[in-house]
Image (spheres, helix red, strand yellow):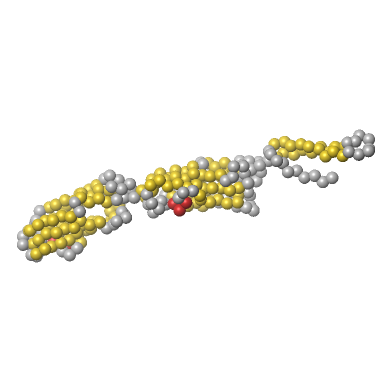
Amino acid sequence: LTVTFTPTTTGARSAAVSVTDNAAGSPQTVSLSGTGTTSAVTLSPSSLAFGNQQVTTTSPVQNTTLTNSGAAPLTISSISLTGANTGDFNQTNNCPLSPSTLAVNGTCTLTVTFTPTTTGARSAAVSVTDNAAGSPQTVSLTGAGTAPAVSLSPTSLSFGNRKVGKNGGTKSVQLTNTGTGTLSIGSIAITGANPADFTQTDNCASSINPGGGCSISVRFRPTATGPRSGAVTITDNASDSPQQVLLTGTGT
């Protein structure tokens, strides 16, 4: 008699092979017993929240530990990103894939980073497909993309008529970070056709938080007669960089 055991559920299972014949003591029996086991997956933590992250920059890594918390080897067929914004997240792992298995009580690590491609709420999931109950198991991923934005008020300064070689007074521009990410200023400079006719000073820090701002003061001192022009050019990490404040005046 050849017998195999294929448990349909976990726990103790029993049966018997019964032989009915014309011998004394019929039917004779062979008792059968076995225990059904299964693999199980525990993910800790089961969600990763990355918070605010500047668009196109990469967050610090966050990890989730996958544990085979069952009583049988775990066979993992795939680990992949799923959900609404898979392009904003990246995952790597050291988990064994089929035909290799993860031993009972064995662990492996899922490593995730967040690089938002646009502003606003972003979400996805790491999906683990395996032979455990509840497959696929998921780790939810959330984050928000942020970006700076520059507002200049006013966007142009007109100094009117000024005598050549004489200071023509000072006018100011207010720069405000109206975006959701930190503004990093690389440079503020006078450019344009007649940069020598204008000078600027400012109190702008290299980094300006959302809602913060600074002032740029410009002075006009024409070096020649006639129309003179230039610009305050601001180079930063906002999407429309460089921004400019147009400058005009007339030397007399």
Q: Position of residue 182 (x, y in %)?
A: 32, 48
Q: Position of residue 177 (x, y in %)?
A: 27, 48
- Residue located 15% across and 64% down the image: 194
- Residue located 62% across and 44% down the image: 132
Q: Quadrant of the C terminus?
A: bottom left
- Residue located 76% across and 36% down the image: 14
- Tell me, yes or no, if residue 31 can be seen here: yes
Q: Quadrant of the N terminus?
A: top right
Would you say 125 lies left or right of 225 here? Answer: right
Q: Position of residue 33 (x, y in %)?
A: 77, 38
Q: Position of residue 213 (x, y in %)?
A: 24, 47
Would you say 184 lies left or right of 8 here? Answer: left
- Compared with 19, 183 (above or below) is below
Would you say 34 lies left or right of 241 here? Answer: right
Outermost residue, top side? 25
- Count of numbered circles in the view: 0
- Compared with 30, 75 (above or below) is below
Q: Quadrant of residue 37?
A: top right
Q: Quadrant of residue 106?
A: top right
- Compared with 62, 246 (above or below) is below
